[in-house]
Amino acid sequence: MYKTLLVEIDNSICVITVNRPDKLNALNKEVFNDLNAVIDDVYKNPEIRSAIITGAGTKAFVAGADISEFLELDTSEATELSARGHKVFDKIENSPKPIVAAVNGFALGGGCELALACHFIYASENAKFGQPEVNLGLIPGYGGTQRLTQLVGRNLAMELLMSGNMISAKEAMEIGVANKVFPPEELLPKTKEILSIIQSKAPVAVSKVIECVNDFDHTQQGYDLEIKKFGECFATGDAKEGASAFLEKRKPNFKGN
Ligand code: COA
């Protein structure tokens, strides 16, 4: 049914696995379409009471947006891409049923943003988190500037977003990005365990917890600014240089315009 996702329902938990391991599960248009459809199903399907998002293979959760789709984008196309991604991630964030990220490897760029859009994050010991968009002459385009700042505070967010540095699972837990860290083989069982506990609670109360927590200090203005600024990056030569350098496996030569 889905081209880029593996989906199974286990004890009313919908386990959604992004399945492009040869591209480290990078988010291309198809993944976004599939994610949009499966989250609709999570909302509507009475057999599903909660969901887990994880990545195929042992190396990556999701290593970002698919950079090969970036080369030809102009400002308006990039703005549209960002806005469409925001819609899907907002749908995850506002799901009335709990959605937990089981981060089993690299969660970079759009992958980190996908995890941040989930209601909370469990990680494996080999997980790595980061927002490396500045390496490509870009900024996050799927909510990262807002959700990361909300979660870890201004100064840590500034450092992570401006340096593009990756942090380990342990560091992610210390700054409140990951709630818990497990050996890789325990990640899914432990994520299912917490969801079984949550599923034993009153579903309407759980969905109202999600609504209230999401409403805390939440302004659409910040997201709209990010969409606009992400699009504007694509008017720069540096954005083309960043994506080309990644795909050609060389260091970018940024000119500042
Ligand atoms: N978009 C498109 N392709 C990606 C990708 C992405 N975000 N991340 C990884 N891939 C592809 C690589 O191009 C490579 O494809 P190839 O085998 O056809 O050449 C494959 O996935 C494996 O990645 P590779 O870079 O060879 O693995 P590595 O172990 O050397 O490095 C990373 C792993 C995660 C450090 C590295 O892939 C990386 O930096 N990815 C991009 C991260 C990023 O900038 N994300 C934000 C995008 S906005």
Image: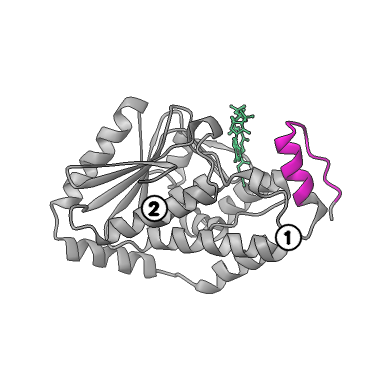
Q: Residue furthest front?
A: 1
- Residue at x 28% of width, y 61% of height: 43
Residue 171, image x, y percentages: 48, 37
- Residue at x 35% of width, y 46% of height: 1
Residue 183 can be seen, yes or no? no
In the depicted view, which residue is nearer to us: 74 or 115? 74
Q: Is residue 154 above or below residue 123?
A: below
- Residue under numbered circle 2: 118
Which comes sooner in the sequence, label 2 or label 1?
1
**Is residue 46 in the magenta section?**
no
Q: Give how far apart the Cα atoms at labels 2 and 1 are.
A: 29 Å
Q: Secondary structure at mark 1?
A: loop
Q: Secondary structure at mark 2?
A: loop
Q: Residues within 10 Å of mark 2 (few under 14, many from 20)?
A: many
Lateral position of residue 156 relative to residue 139, left or right: left
**Which quadrant of the structure image shows residue 167?**
top right
- Residue under numbered circle 1: 74
- Residue at x 71% of width, y 46% of height: 136
The quadrant of the picture showing ligand 1 is top right
Residue 89 can be seen, yes or no? yes
Lateral position of residue 60 relative to residue 137, left or right: left
Residue 11, image x, y percentages: 17, 43
Residue 2, image x, y percentages: 39, 45
- Residue at x 51% of width, y 45% of height: 111
Q: Is residue 173 above or below residue 114?
A: above
What amino acid type is highlighted by mark number 2? Cys
What range of the chain is rendered magenta?
Answer: 239-255
